[in-house]
Amino acid sequence: MTTEALHPFSKQLLAWYPAHARDLPWRQTTDPYVIWLSEIILQQTRVAQGLPYFHKLVAAFPSVGALAAAEESVLFRNWQGLGYYSRARNLHKTAKLIVDQHHGVFPSTYQDLLQLPGVGPYTAAAIASFAFGEAAPVVDGNVFRILSRYFGIETDIMHASARKEFTAIAQGLIPHAQAATFNQAIMEFGSLQCSPVPNCADCPLRISCNAYATKRTQSLPIKSKSKAARNRYFNYIVVVHQDKFLVRIRTEKDIWQGLWEFVMHETEHVADAPEAFGPYTDWLDFPMTELKAPAKHLLSHQRIFSKAWLIQVPDYVKLAIPSNFQWMDAQEFENCGKPVLLLNLITDNLILHEWLHL
Ligand code: SF4
């Protein structure tokens, strides 16, 4: 039997890992469905925030078949608060595809996993290695950071060619016999040791780390500035009539597609009534209260500034409603997936909070 020769980097990383590995539930399984679910949750979410959602989603949808059979609105309800709903939409689409086209069995190679919607090179490598032992290296921000520091690489990690370069290096480091452990170890090392502010003082790789030797641990990796966030101004009009709310589902290719909201008019800048009401100024004749709206809501590339008003339409009035809107009672609306901004709006206003029992 031949022993695989390991690069000193891999040897030290694998020696570091057992004493530092956190006990996380998705590390106790080789079920590709559970691993996939955890990876999608963790794509834009920190471990501490993602853990309760992981438990909730595995309990609600214990298999890919259960997820495929679920209503999208039920998945959204369980996903509520995690944000980036395109992840939930892709999960659902992929679960259906696996059931319809793969008889409910996950593809088992990196290349086949890459064909699934919402599964990019990182997630495909994670599933291929953790579930099937394939030597496919995971490459994400953690890996860019560690390798650029350790090897002193000055490639801009925002550049399109960076992934190819770092993947080739990682491919040369990953041991075929311990692919899953190596991938887990490098991710953990990026979270706990070689983090954005690295803990070099007790790092086992320090002796051979290029950035440490050349005092560049703060300047590597090189990362050019990403595009500036865009400001948006959302004016919510919460219309209540005969104990029902006027609501709609967002269908446009925009943030929060598939989630529910009250009437909303977007303006180019901070606005007050009547400008904030846009086409709905007729409603200004009804009793109106300005609500406390979340002042600034941050998304990855957008800053949302919001204002909100409550319009209480007398019961006897027959109100014409804009197309795509419908009346919904509190209980029905409670069961609809909503953006976090809207949940905060409801929680911050006692009158809405009591109506909607959130
Ligand atoms: S010495 Fe510092 S920069 Fe180098 S690998 Fe260790 S933690 Fe990262």
Image: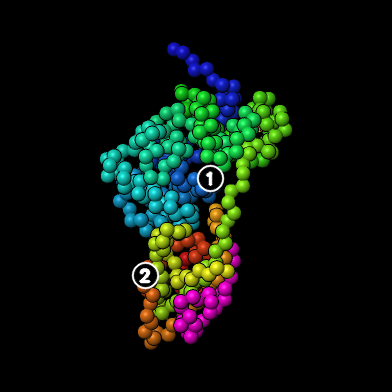
Q: Is residue 259 above or below residue 45?
A: below
The label nearer to you, 1 versus 2, is 2
Residue 9, picture quadrant? top right
Q: Are marks 1 and 2 in contact (CB under 8 Å)?
A: no
Task: Identify whether 60 is placed above or below 316.
Answer: above
- Residue type (three-letter) at the residue carrying disc 1: Val
**Magenta residue check for 355:** no
Badge 2: few (under 14), some or many (20 or more) residues near its Cα, within 10 Å?
Answer: few
Rendering quadrant holding ligand 1: top right
Relative to 250, 166 lies left or right: right
Query: In the rendered image, which residue does mark 1 sit on?
Result: 47
Expressed as whole percent of the image width and height from the top left, the position of residue 352 reads: 49, 72
Q: What amino acid is found at the position of numbered circle 2 in the picture?
A: Asn
* Left or right: 230 in relation to 111: right
- Compare marks 1 and 2 and give the one earlier in the sequence: 1
How far separated are the C-alphas under marks 1 and 2? Answer: 38 Å
Say the numbered circle drawn on residue 324: 2
Residue drawn at (50%, 76%), measured in percent from left and top? Answer: 277
Give the total number of marks visible in the rendering.
Answer: 2
Q: Residue 196 location, x and y as percent? A: 64, 41
